[in-house]
Image: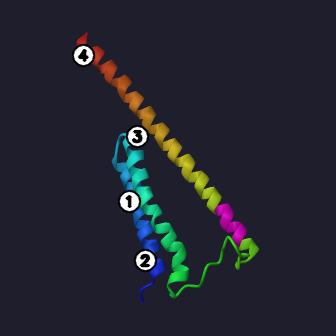
Amino acid sequence: MWDARLTSELILLFLYLGFMALQAAIDDPRRADKAGALLALVGVVNVPIIYFSVKWWNTLHQGASVSLTKAPSMAATMLTGMLIMTFRLLVLRHRGGAAARALHHARARARQRLGGAIRERQSA
C-alpha cells in the first residue's frame, strides 16, 4: 500500500544523499558549499510536507508523537533520548564537515608547496 509519509521521507533521503554526493563531487570548497546550499533549499520544501502528511493523509502510521502545542504522547525517557541523540548527531556532523574542510585546505597547501619545490629543481 502506498504511504505518503514514507514516500516523502524517501524523497528527503534521496535529496540528502544527493547533497553529500554533490559536496564530494566538486573540488572547490566555495562552489561545493554554494551548490550544496542550493540543493538544501530545495530539500527544505519537503520538510513541511513530511510534517503535515500526518494530518493530510490517513495512512498506516500513527499521528504525531511530538507537538509544539501539546504535551508529547511518547514516554519522557524516549523523548529525552531522542533529543540527546539528535543534538549529538548534529554536533558530530558539524565537526566532521569542519575536519574535512581543514584536511582539504591542508592538502591544497601541500600541493602548492610541492609544486613550487619541483619547479625550482627543474629550473636549476
User: Which of labels 4 and 3 is toward the front?
Assistant: 3
Q: Residue at x 53, y 76 (%)?
A: 52
Under mark 2, the amino acid is: Thr
The quadrant the C terminus occupies is: top left
x then y, percent, for residue 3: 45, 84
Q: How far apart are marks 2 and 1 (CA)?
A: 16 Å
Under mark 4, the amino acid is: Gln
Q: Residue at x 65, y 78 (%)?
A: 65
Under mark 1, the amino acid is: Gly
Q: Mark 1 points at which residue?
A: 18
Q: Name the residue under label 2.
A: 7
x then y, percent, for residue 75: 73, 77
**Residue 19 vs residue 81: left or right?**
left
Q: Mark 3 points at which residue?
A: 30
- Part of the protein shown in magenta: 79-85
Q: Distance between the residues labelled 3 and 2?
A: 32 Å
Q: Is mark 1 on a helix, strand or loop?
A: helix
What residue occupies the far left of the structure in this picture? 123
How many dots with numbers?
4
Is residue 80 a member of the stretch shown in magenta? yes
Q: Is mark 2 on a helix, strand or loop?
A: helix
What residue occupies the far right of the structure in this picture? 76
Are circles 3 and 2 on residues that touch, CB within 8 Å? no
**Residue 123 vs residue 20: left or right?**
left
The quadrant the N terminus occupies is: bottom left
x then y, percent, for residue 46: 46, 68
Q: Residue at x 47, y 72 (%)?
A: 9
User: Which of labels 4 and 2 is toward the front?
Assistant: 2
Mark 3 neighbour class, 10 Å CA radius: few under 14, some 14 to 19, many 20 or more:
few
Q: Which of marks 2 and 1 is nearer the N terminus?
A: 2
Q: Is mark 4 on a helix, strand or loop?
A: helix
